[in-house]
Amino acid sequence: MTVEPSNLQPQDRLDVTSRRDLEQMFSGDYSSGRSLDRAAADMSLSEKRIGNESSQSDDGLGAMLGNLPEHAQLLSEIWEDDSYPFEALLGPDAQTTQQPEVRRRRSKPPSATTSSLTQPPALGWGVPSQQQQHQSWTQPVANFFSQPIPGVASASSQVHIPPLRSRKKTTSIFRSEVMSLVQLYIPSDVARYTVAQLGEMGLIQFRDLNQDVSAFQRSFVGDVRRFDEIERKLRYLQSKIVESDVDLYDFLDNDFISAARGPREIDEMEETVNAHEGRVLRLTAAYKEMQLTHVELVENKHVLEEVSSLFTEITGRQSTAPTAHGGTSGPLDSVPLLGRTDTMASRRSIGSMDAARGELAFDAEIGGMSVGHDINIGFITGVISRDRISTLERVLWRSLRGNMFLNYVDIEEPISDPRHEEPVYKSAFIVFAHGETLRDRATKIAESLGATLYNVDPSAERRQEELIDTMSRLDDLRQILENNRVARINELTSVSEQINTWFTVVRKEKAVYHALNLFNYDSNRNCLIAEGWCATNDIPAIQSALHVATEDAGSNVPTVLQELRTTKEPPTFVRTNRFTEGFQNIVDAYGVPKAGEVNPGLFTVITFPFLFALMFGDLGHGFLMTLCAALLCYYEKRLAWMAKDESLRMFYSGRYIVLLMGIFSMFTGFLYNDIFSRAMAPFASGWRWPTDAGGEGVVVEATKLGHTYPVGIDPAWHHASNSLLFTNSYKMKMSIVLGVIHMTLGICLQVPNALHFKKRINIIHVFVPQIIFLFSIFGYLVFVIILKWSTDWYARDAAGELTHISPPSLLNMLIYMFLRPGSVNESERMFSGQAFLQTLLLLTALVCVPWMLLVKPLILRNEHRKIVSEGYGRISSHVRVSTEADGMAGAVVLSEQEEMQADDFDFAEIMINQSIHTIEFCLNSISNTASYLRLWALSLAHAQLSEVLWSMIFQPTLKMSGVLQPVAIMFGFAVWFTLTFCILIGMEGLSAFLHALRLHWVEFNNKFYDGTGVKFEPFSFKAVLDEADEQ
């Protein structure tokens, strides 16, 4: 429809301003397939560039805008007309839709225009004069995009945006949320603010538009590396805080974390972190260097002390001097040279002085020790680890062939060496050897074993001076080390007050740039193009976030959001709360539902704890479980630390599951009339035991009183010898009935799935034959179970004869229904016409097998032939391409190419697949029904084990007498309660949990649930921080 402006009527204006016509109005030099939202982003960006470069020529801009003024003037007239139906353009909810309350921070005021003309009202403007040429191009564009245009998110106003699809609210967990693929055009100067705001909300999952680009070639890899480096420095500071035993504060500066941080704040934070790291590095390096010096001084002190002591002892023991040629029987030969075994037991020596000096003379002087001119005996001294001293002895002895003398002494206190994590025990040693060659060899051997050698002067006076100097330096160094330690503690304390805040900010900023790397960068338009999935109901909230981000950045150019039509399979987003989250995790562990598929999580909330309770039914055990779970739920905020512990995380996350499991266990325990394996009698029993029972071992029969116990099992059965027979039969039949009901629910859920995905063939030719097949066999079994329960098999007529034969065996009846169809044994007959009914049901079940097997594939083949004959074998969707207006760049693909072809129809493959499903369903109907007997088996095991613990541990203490009875009762109760809690509640509870899990995953889900979806994982700072905390 073509409408001239002069003849435009109100009823025609809606057509002109509809979404498609608006896109055509902006065709100009743009491609005809271009969207209005893209044009809005381009015009706004162009307006900003021209506003910043007002002195430059705007001929290029005019060429790009084409004939925009005429169209904009036409739109201005439409908007000024009071008769124009704005509600039709904006949608019925435009005036009533309320946007979520958002946080508004600083916003830079719009820059003043360079023209002196006043702004024209609305979108109307006159023909510009030559002086007003610049404003005539820029201001109308800005005014136009300040108006609420359908499909475009505005930074200056919040309006309801008509969707491309129905915005039907989905708030239950019956199905996943309706998802939309949205596209964002983000100006570069607000990109970081926009992504940060979206990360705080966690509502959109971005798609990677740069899959063909490696991680090292993306636009913002430099920023990611920058924050990686800052995070590395923070981890270093954190390790030093832990190493120095400084308290790590949990304080978070929420104002700084939640604020819209600009580049200046980030730079200041980085400078602060760098300054702290630099100071800590310098202090740590200086501390380590001084520690090494301290170790050397300490070792040197010990060496000087021991050598001086040894030399003094030598001169004190030496009564005669050796001759120049030959030995003497003086102390140097009879006593180890460095002996002093009477005063220091830790000293050891090896070798002899004769071997060290050979045939040379030795000259000793009182008060010191000097070496003669015609002998060459020297020594080396040092410190070595205590566990290597024996190795040093053996290697020196063999290497020097005994021409040496070694003595060593253990240093009592350990030496803190910064090169080792723990203090090291060491020994000081001295080695005498003859000749320079042997001493060099001994030196190399000692150094190879990790010994530290020190030069000791032979003169006693110099040794004493050196020892005094070493002691003085040690005192000074200890004071310096203490000052360094205090300075480091003060520095790390100041860091610990802010390090959690810095960690949070850095991880958020790094996540922002990781997200920006997923976007497509348009350098010519200076904007980023992003695509992502979000819930359709969350689009207004996302628009509000975009508005806040634009204000935080102080920009006048809004971020443009539009929905895209796509055939891509969306991710699955099931909106849960802290109560339903645990149940949904159980479903997701089996498989994430497809988009739009019925979610089993809704039914799991009730069926899972109920099936668990059938196996765990005990009022006392259920109460203890409920109490524990209730405490976890009540103090969940105080116990939130459990979510970070691997061993407790599962129990804390499933606290509401455990709560319902306990409540349902109390309910079934009340029905079973079990409380810690004991019976309750809140109502009058329907049986009476005879008072004259006779002697021990006599079997008596209870008398029926004529009324039935109101709720649950009569307590009289707990004292009967045939109690186990009754409860086994009761629980076994109950398991079959509940199992068939549970499977029937699963099969019925195929109907809403088929209706949602528009596969009505699955209703008629899959659901109907399956439900008929199940009811023909196991529905009939449920019927006869209920009939058997409802019949009084011991009723007598007026003559006192039994009106019925003994109760039939339902198992035999079901077996012979297949083995001998059309005949029923008289002992198993329950009603007239039973044989005919069983034959009819069996034939019906047999008919359902070819129905499930053949009908659907044949119908699909006929439909395929019809489509091929009509020529609709291929459907293609074209790529939407936007061509640059200035012609400088090529085409920008706004969305990936999506080509949809009709699947190659292979009748054989479909037939095989249908055969597998048919056989699987028929066999599973039998095996799944039998699988529900685990409800009976585990309930029996739980009841019997509870009875054993009571009768074998606690009950004997109640029968005791005497003064020790209270002590025995207390001890017996403690043991009984501990075993009850650990075995019955812990181990049996885990077993029942796993069996209930299997019944849902296998017996229930396989009836209707595919579980082949992909979970919705939005970009969220909370998820980023939680993942970092787990690491």
Image: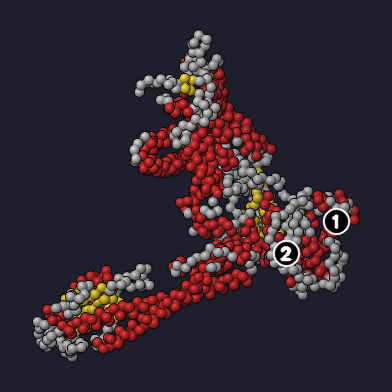
Q: Which amino acid type is shown beneath numbered disc 2?
A: Val
Which corner quadrant of the image does residue 467 belong to?
A: bottom left
Apparent side of residue 229 relative to residue 752 in the rendered image (left or right): left
Give the SS element for disc 2.
loop
Estimate the x, y position of residue 450 in percent, counting from the top left: 30, 73
Task: Give the image's coloring scheme.
Answer: secondary structure
The residue that appears at 16% across and 78% down in the rendered structure is 336
Q: CA distance from mark 1 to mark 2?
A: 24 Å
On screen, residue 687 above or below 1016: above
The residue that appears at 27% across and 84% down in the rendered structure is 456
The residue that appears at 50% across and 70% down in the rendered structure is 493
The residue that appears at 27% across and 79% down in the rendered structure is 303
Give the SS element for disc 1.
helix
Mark 1 and 2 residues: CB-CB less than 8 Å, in contact? no
Q: Which amino acid type is shown beneath numbered disc 1?
A: Ile
- Residue 934 visible in the shown view: no
On screen, residue 797 above or below 266: above
On screen, residue 314 above or below 641: below
Residue 78: give its label.
1
Question: Crowding at label 1, few (<14), some or many (≥20) Cα neighbours within 10 Å?
Answer: many
**Which residue does the numbered mark 2 point to in the structure image?**
557
Q: Nearer the viewer, residue 559 or 527?
A: 559
Residue furthest front as drawn: 963
Apparent side of residue 888 relative to residue 244 in the rendered image (left or right): right
Q: Nearer the viewer, residue 375 or 277?
A: 277
Estimate the x, y position of residue 940 in percent, counting from the top left: 44, 32
Q: Nearer the viewer, residue 291 or 485?
A: 485
Question: Crowding at label 2, few (<14), some or many (≥20) Cα neighbours within 10 Å?
Answer: many
- Residue 338 visible in the shown view: yes
Apparent side of residue 240 relative to residue 227 in the rendered image (left or right): left
